[in-house]
Amino acid sequence: MRSIPKKQEILLDEEIDELEFINIMNSFYKQDCYIYAIIPEYEQDLLNELSNDFIEVNKFPLPRSFPREIGYLGYIKDSQKRYVYEFYLRSTTMDYLIFSETDVSGQLNKLTKKNWDIYKLFQFYKVPHITIGPDGQWLNIVQY
C-alpha cells in the first residue's frame, strides 16, 4: 500500500529573525539537520563561506538561466543549525533547497544532468523533509 505524504504549512513572520527561524527548525530537528541544495554559481560568496562544510556531489547546467549557469549539488550536515537561516535568506534565489534529518547523501549520486530534480528523490524514497515556500513566506513540512 502506498503511503500518502502528510503535508503541513507553517506561515513565517515577514520579519523573522535568525533565532526564531532556528527555534522553528529545532522543533522539528532536535539533532542533525541536513541541508540539501543545488547552489547556483552566482552564489559564489555562499560557496566560499561553506567551503569546508559543503560536500559537493555533482554539478549541472541550470535551466532557465542565460547565459547558462552551473549549479552545485551537495549537502551540509548542520548539527549546530549554523547555516539554516543563511539558506532560508537565500531561498528566493535557489530553486532546489531541502532540509531533512535523514541522511540521503548516498542517493544524491543517482541524480544526473537529465534527471536532477532533488524533490523527486525525496518523494521516491519517502523521506520526511522541509522546503521553503515562495518568497520565504512559509515552510512546507512533508512527513510519511
Image: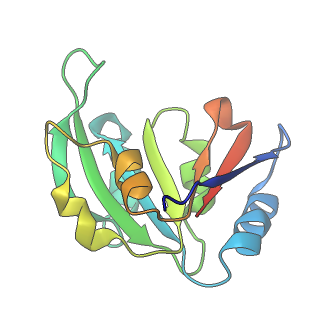
- Position of the C terminus by quadrant: bottom right
Q: Which of 67 and 127 is in front in this view?
A: 127
Q: Is residue 68 above or below residue 14?
A: above
Please state the total of marks drawn on the protein image: 0
Which residue is drawn at the image coordinates 55% and 33% (left, top)?
A: 92
Residue 79 quadrant: bottom right
Tell me which residue sits at (61%, 44%) in the image.
Answer: 132
**Residue 50 x %, y %:** 38, 63
Residue, far left: 113
Q: Position of residue 41 (x, y in %)?
A: 27, 39
Residue found farthest to the top: 66
Residue at 37% in and 47% down: 120
Above or below residue 98? Residue 13 is above
In the rendered image, the vertical position of residue 119 relative to residue 32, given as above or below: above
Q: x, y (%) of residue 20?
A: 82, 60
Query: Residue 68 at x, y = what percent?
Result: 18, 22
**Between residues 84 and 115, which one lies in front from this camera angle?**
115
Q: Report which quarter residue 3 is drawn in.
A: bottom right
> Residue 142 vs residue 49: left or right?
right
Is 121 positioned to the left or the right of 35 in the image? left
Residue at the far front in the pictured view: 1
Which color scheme does this rendered protein use?
A: rainbow
Task: Please name whichever residue, 8 or 65, is drawn nearer the observer in this view of the structure.
Answer: 8
